[in-house]
Image: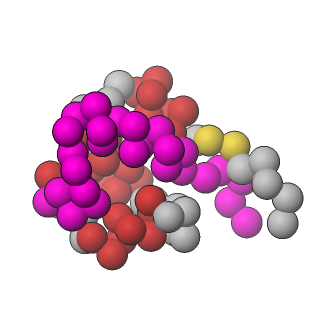
Amino acid sequence: MNQYIVDTDAIKIIMIKKKIKSQMELSRRSGINRNVLSNVLNNKKYPSSTVMNKLISALDIDQDTAGKIFLHMNLLKT
């Protein structure tokens, strides 16, 4: 199991700040298929490096913030 999860709360906060109102809008802005994006934002799938880069670009976030979002430790016990 991947030891990292995506900090989806942080992504949603950034979306609000950037006035991105829906996953569909983020999908259009990023060029990420909306089903792939939905899986990432619901922590069903860990994003590929390509998807991460598209999200970083679409959300206009710096590397430090990106690291905190995409390298968020999965502290939940399974």
Q: Is residue 16 rendered magenta in the image?
A: yes
Q: Residue 10: x percent and y percent?
A: 47, 38
Coordinates of residue 77 in the picture (x, y in percent) = 85, 59
Q: Is residue 75 above or below residue 36?
A: above
Q: Is residue 12 left or right of residue 19?
A: right
- Magenta highlight range: 1-28
Front residue of this view, candidates 2 and 9: 9
Screen quadrant of the N terminus: bottom right
| Quadrant housing residue 24 | bottom left
In front here: 1 or 13?
13
- Image coordinates for residue 74, horizontal then vertical, percent: 72, 50
The location of residue 3, given as percent across then percent down, is 72, 53
Residue 48 in sight in this render: yes
Please give the name of the residue rendered at 25% of the width and 70% of the height, measured from the top-left corner: 33
User: Magenta stretch containing residue 4, yes or no?
Assistant: yes
Q: Is residue 47 left or right of residue 18?
A: right
Describe residue 58's horizontal placement relative to residue 62 as left or right. left
Q: Residue at x 14, y 52 (%)?
A: 29
